[in-house]
Amino acid sequence: MNDDLQLIGPFSQIITFEGTSLRGALMDDALSIVEHGGILIKGEQIIDVDKYSSLAQMHSSATLHKVLEDAVAMPGLIDAHTHICFAGSRSKDFAARNSGIPYQEIAKQGGGIWSTVKHTRQASKQELVGLMKNRLSRLVDLGITTVEIKSGYGLSVEEELKLLRAIDLMRNNTPLSIIPTCLAAHIVPREYENAKSYIQDILNLLVPEVKAKGLCNRFDIFVEDNAFSIEDADLYLSELKKHGFDLTVHGDQFTTGGSEIAVRHNALSVDHLEVSTDKEIGMIAESETVAMALPGASLGLGCDFTPCRKILDANGILAIASDWNPGSAPMGNLLVQASVLATYEKLSAAEVLAGITFRAAHALGLKDRGRISKGQKADISVFPTADYSDILYQQGSLLPHSVWKDGLRIK
Ligand code: NIG
Ligand code: FE
């Protein structure tokens, strides 16, 4: 670690999100911009953000890192929902869906999640690490510095452990922060007669090993027809809570019910919400649970976007993630997806960028990142433009020129 003082800048604009509200609608003044700014770093942390000239004067011993003439700095992006620990492709599912066969029907016919499970079971832990490594390097190019990765394509105690161990290995092989989540409750595996017996095995056999080895502190469940029922989820989430795990739920993707159970169990986030009605929106907005929009799944399946405008106007907490997975969301490009979501849901730049920075951090239970302010991690993405509005306007084609993670330049 470099413990010397480092000064990065001067930036045309720094989007700091200093003091910006966690909840509700935002106008662009909420970006809290410092013009002609500099960022002072010591070790892994930001220690000051101010006009570049005054920081340079006050800290003449700092190592200077000059940037482009036109550059906008913003907090490193956070992709708070991915399934990038998988092997194989689902291009046949994509073609089948485009011929008119629904996602849930393909799953019933033996395609869908189960086909990825078959490929992923055949892959070794090292092969999965290699696949994730390539995917992570694409994320760095987009300016992402923290990524959540779910298991969920193993679907047996041993295979889920293999995936969680691969994700754990990956953590030591990348500069990015990886937040692992156990999604053993993705669908009921074919080897089990019913959801209850599988859930019992997860609780009795998988959970103790996860705890003993510290493989993750978050659990997810897919609440849906063809996956897990509300009753299954109720029992599962209550037991996991007793173990002290953080909870998150895939809910309201095709049918409602998942959001209610997520809020009832105080989940950190409920993700998808494409079919949430005003009733669910009101309930989520009154809760502490983050609503996570996954525009990549809407684009992948050709269905409605999460009702983000309504969630924000009801004072909910909205985050946005890629859902990168081989089935519903193969694109894996959060910048493109968040920009497109803005045009369909009529979101301000502040609302979108908050959703992929500090509001996404909140969904992961992280308070130490997502803003550019004193005490936060020195995770910074630098875009080659003088004006922040170019970032979303160019719909993902304007890529960061440089990326800093924990005070080190990684792109
Ligand atoms: O978030 N909906 C459930 N799980 C994933 C899709 C997984 C897959 O199709 O492989 C999702 O969309
Ligand atoms: Fe997902």
Image (cartoon, rainbow, N blue to C red):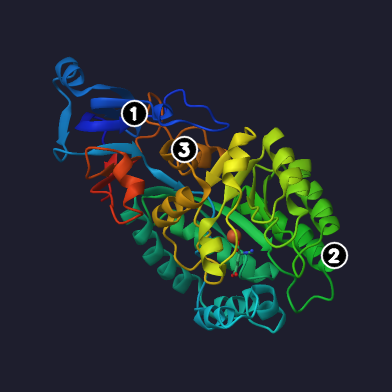
Sequence-first tag of 2 and 3: 2
Residue 43 vertical position relative to residue 242 in the rendered view, above or below: above
Numbered circles on residues, count: 3
Residue occupying image coordinates x 40% and y 30%: 31
Residue occupying image coordinates x 49% and y 56%: 322
Is ligand 2 closer than 8 angstroms to the Cβ of mark 1?
Answer: no
Q: Is residue 272 visible?
A: yes
Percent of width and height locating residue 309 = 57, 42
Secondary structure beneath label 3: helix
Identified by mark 1, the residue type is Ile
Q: Tell us which disc is closer to us: 2 or 3.
A: 3
Q: Tell us which disc is closer to us: 3 or 1.
A: 3
Sequence-first tag of 3 and 1: 1
Residue where numbered disc 3 is placed? 354
Quadrant of picture, ligand 2: bottom right
1 and 2 marks in contact (CB < 8 Å) = no
Left or right: where 390 falls relative to 21: left
Identified by mark 3, the residue type is Ala
Residue occupying image coordinates x 37% and y 66%: 134
Q: Residues within 10 Å of mark 1 (few under 14, many from 20)?
A: many
Q: Rounded to the nearest whole Å, what is the CA distance between mark 3 and mark 1?
A: 19 Å
Q: Quadrant of the N terminus?
A: top left
Residue 196, label in figure: 2
Percent of width and height locating residue 131 = 42, 70
Residue 46, label in figure: 1
Sequence-first tag of 1 and 2: 1
Percent of width and height locating residue 175 = 36, 50
